[in-house]
Every structure is written in C-alpha cells, then in structure tokens.
C-alpha cells in the first residue's frame, strides 16, 4: 500500500486547458481566491492561507487551477517587499496545518513562483524572459524560446535489516540530534532503483537486496520530487557513515526509537517530510501519538 504523504494531498484541478485563454483567465481572475507570496513565504491568518481581493491585488500573477466547485485559484508573487511580513510564513511552518485543497494550491504556488524567480534569463541566448500561458511557461523576449518548469527527482529510502530494524543517519548540517532516512538526487541516465542502490552504498555501505516503492511527494524547496522506497540490506553489521555527507548512523528497533525520541536523545524529521511519513508507517498506527518532536529544520 502506498503512503499517504502530507504534501501529495491535493483537490485542486490544474485545468491546464484554460492557460491559453487570456480572456477567460481575466474573467476567472475577477472571481478568484488569490494567494499572496513574498519570496518563498505565504500570507496567512489563524485559519490557514489568507486570500487577497483580486480587484486590489497587484503583482505578477499565475493561475493555479479550480477547486471542486469551480472557484479559480491564483497566486500573486513579489520577490521582496517593504511591507510588514509578520503574517507571512513558510510552507515548512504551515504545511502540516493546511487542508487538502490549500496544501495542493500552496505546493503548486511555491514551486511555480520559485521557478519564475530563478529563470529570468533565456537558457539559449541569455536575454530576458517573460511569463506566458498563465505562468506555466516563460518565453524569451529575443529568440522566442519557450522554457517550462523543471522538477529534480530525488530518491529517499528507509533502510531496514532482516530483523526489521531501521537505519537512520545524521547529516552535519542538521540541528543537533536530528536523524533521518537516506536520500539523494537521481543522476542523468539513472533509474530510480539504481539510484536507491547507489545512494545506500555511498552513504552507509549497505548492500540492497530488496526494495519496495512507497509513493512520491513534491518537495518544492525549491524544485524537487521525492520518490520513496523501503530497502532491505544484507550487511547490517558492516555499515558505517561515509563521514562526508553522513556523520553518524544508528540502528533502531521500535522500542529504541520510542525511548530515544521521548527522552529527546533523538529528533525525527519534520511532520510534512517524506522521511517522517516513512518512519511513522514503519513504526505503526500509534506513531503520531507516541513519536514526539521534529519541527526544527536544518541549520
């Protein structure tokens, strides 16, 4: 069974067929719910996302889609702002509290706005570009080349042994005591499965003998998608941290994981991460209630 991953929830119809209809988009805009973003942060209120009045909203706007009742969603984005940003928060902070509709809109908005901000120049001739197709494309002002958003695939893997213990590792850049699963970007010409085998071997020396696909989740920080696997290795006693990316590893039973998270000796990944979902699924149905901590992010 595939995992129910936090950022994969979405009830927003992207309605790609509407992106080329300029007149139709203008009509949709007048009835839209408008998400406001500055940089990589969202305007919020105590209930979730705070929506702007489309008649008074200014800035570069991108179409996100329609909800189940046909209400359109757009995002207005500013790279920087001189206004008070006290009500603006990161998706890392608010993601766990958003409903299925808002999380789908927010993930799309974050990925799209970060791509636009990073691709102001044409990759072919170096000239400026402008958004078109409601924000789904950037077009070069000189050569006319069309540029589309890209997503970087990365595998993430929960390593196990034949005793059903899990192996967690700690990166040097993480907060103290934070441990998580292993992950890495898929290289050119590499399959997901080959990437799992390579990353486990590189980061801890494990030899993968079995693997199972668990699901995928967008990770727009800024442009990744995480492809999740569970993998069993044949040499649990021989593994060790690579000393470069991973500085420490630890084998854990369910009882040991509970004891160490309860005492604060070990911190788990954040609630919205794929890693936390994989660990919780392995731990069992009481994970949400029993496994504490995990909302501190990297240093």
Image (spheres, grey):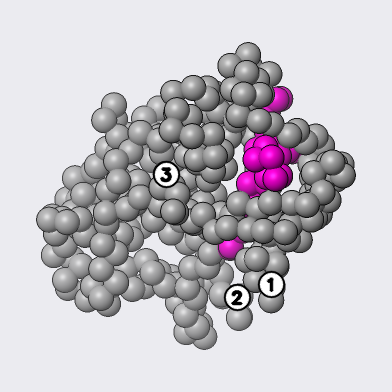
Q: Specify whether 210 is left or right of 36.
A: right
Q: Specify whether 173 is left or right of 116.
A: right
Mark 3–mark 2 Cα distance, whole angstroms, equals: 34 Å
Q: Within the magenta stretch, is there residue 190?
A: no
Q: From this viewpoint, is residue 141 visible?
A: no
* Residue range (magenta): 152-180
Q: Residue furthest front?
A: 163
| Front one among 213 and 241 | 213
Quick one: SS at disc 3?
Answer: helix
Name the quadrant of the C terminus: top right
Q: Is residue 187 above or below residue 230?
A: below
| Front one among 263 and 1 | 1
Q: Which residue is labeled 1 in the image?
A: 190
Q: Which residue is labeled 3 in the image?
A: 6
Q: Is residue 182 above or below residue 88?
A: below
Q: What residue lies at 29% left-to-right and 41% top-to-bottom?
A: 99
| Front one among 65 and 276 | 276
Quick one: SS at disc 1?
Answer: loop
Residue 262 lies in quadrant: top right
Dot label at residue 123: 2
Q: What residue lies at 65% left-to-right and 71% top-to-bottom?
A: 191
Q: From this viewpoint, is residue 28 visible?
A: yes
């Amino acid at each position: 069974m595939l995992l129910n991953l936090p950022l994969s929830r979405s009830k927003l119809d992207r309605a790609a067929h509407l992106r080329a209809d300029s007149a139709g988009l203008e009509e949709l805009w007048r009835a839209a719910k408008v998400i406001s973003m500055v940089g990589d942060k969202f305007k919020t209120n105590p209930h979730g996302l705070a929506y702007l009045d489309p008649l008074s909203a200014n800035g570069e706007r991108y179409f996100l889609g329609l909800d189940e009742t046909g209400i359109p969603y757009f995002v207005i984005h500013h790279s920087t702002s001189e206004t008070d940003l006290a009500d603006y928060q990161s998706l890392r902070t608010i993601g766990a509290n958003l409903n299925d509709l808002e999380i789908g809109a927010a993930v799309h908005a974050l990925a799209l706005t970060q791509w636009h901000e990073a691709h102001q120049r044409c990759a072919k001739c170096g000239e400026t570009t402008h958004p078109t197709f409601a924000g789904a494309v950037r077009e070069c002002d000189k050569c006319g080349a069309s540029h589309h958003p890209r997503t970087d695939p990365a595998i993430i893997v929960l390593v196990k042994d034949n005793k059903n213990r899990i192996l967690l590792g700690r990166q040097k850049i993480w907060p103290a005591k934070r441990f998580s699963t292993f992950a890495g970007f898929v290289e050119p010409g590499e399959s997901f499965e080959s990437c799992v085998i390579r990353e486990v071997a590189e980061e801890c020396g494990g030899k993968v003998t079995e693997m199972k696909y668990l699901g995928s989740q967008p990770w727009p920080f800024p442009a990744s998608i995480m492809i999740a696997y569970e993998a069993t290795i044949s040499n649990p006693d021989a593994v060790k941290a690579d000393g470069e990316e991973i500085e420490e590893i630890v084998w854990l039973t369910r009882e040991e994981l509970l004891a160490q998270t309860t005492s604060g000796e070990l911190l788990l990944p954040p609630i919205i991460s794929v890693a936390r979902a994989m660990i919780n699924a392995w731990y069992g149905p009481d994970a949400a209630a029993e496994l504490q901590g995990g909302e501190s992010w990297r240093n």
